[in-house]
Amino acid sequence: MKCFTFSALIAVNFIFMYSCKSPEVKKSPVVISKDSTIVVADTTTIPAGPDTVATAKAPLPLTLVITNLASATGPVIVGVYGTKNKFPDPRDQLKVYKFTPHDKQLTAQITDLPAGTYAMAIFQDVNSNGKIDKNLIGIPTEPYAFSKNYKPTVKAPAFKDCCFDYLAQNDTINMKMIR
């Protein structure tokens, strides 16, 4: 295998970028409903040539169904952790989502997460102060939950206790809040 210098790679990349025509991608619009549910059309149209059009299936959204909420209006904070994040450290989340329920159950969709292995730690911010409240010994006083409905006994769970595979055939996560 031959080694290329950095400047040679830049030149090859420049030539490739300006000598090839890339097809235009037209994506369907994203619609956010008043109940914080995100809806995305299920196909993306990609022109493949002057006379042909190819249609690719967009990934299914990850649907969250969260039950046993303490408040019908308190925001639910969802922390998503990947395999390289320090679970359940709130300073090392891969992504954070905030949903506002309109009932004692929340159904929401996450559309920007690629397929992979994840774990979730969620809580309901009943007093809307932006953080999970805890007692003197560190036990949460606001409702919380972990993916796979893991219920901790003495210490916080490990990633392996709560991880799940997000694939096309596994696109719904059910969690029950611990109060």
Image (tube, rainbow, N blue to C red):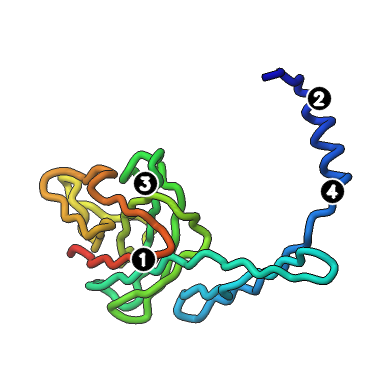
User: Looking at the picture, how far across and down is residue 151, in whole percent?
Assistant: 16, 55
Q: CA distance from mark 4 to mark 2?
A: 18 Å
Residue picked out by circle 1: 76
Q: Which residue, given by chain and number where applicable, does mark 4 sit on?
A: 20
| Mark-to-mark CA distance, 2 and 3 | 43 Å
Name the kind of residue labelled 3 in the image.
Pro
Marks 4 and 1, how far apart in space?
46 Å
Q: Secondary structure at mark 3?
A: loop
Residue 52's disc is none
In this picture, residue 105 sits left or right of residue 2: left
Residue 141 in the image: above or below residue 56 = above
- Picture coordinates of residue 127, whole percent (x, y): 32, 66
Which residue is at 23% across, 65% downward? 177
First-in-chain label (4 vs 1): 4
Tell which tag, 4 or 2, sits nearer the viewer: 4
Give me the residue at 49% from left, 57% from top.
113
Asked if labels 2 and 1 touch by Cβ distance under 8 angstroms, the answer is: no
Please give the label number shown on residue 8: 2
Q: CA distance from mark 3 to mark 1?
A: 14 Å
Per the image, the residue denoted by label 3 is: 90
Chain-order first, disc 4 or disc 3:
4
Which marked residue is nearer to the observer: mark 4 or mark 1?
4
Single out the mark in the foreground, 1 or 2. Answer: 2
Task: Give SS at disc 2.
Answer: helix
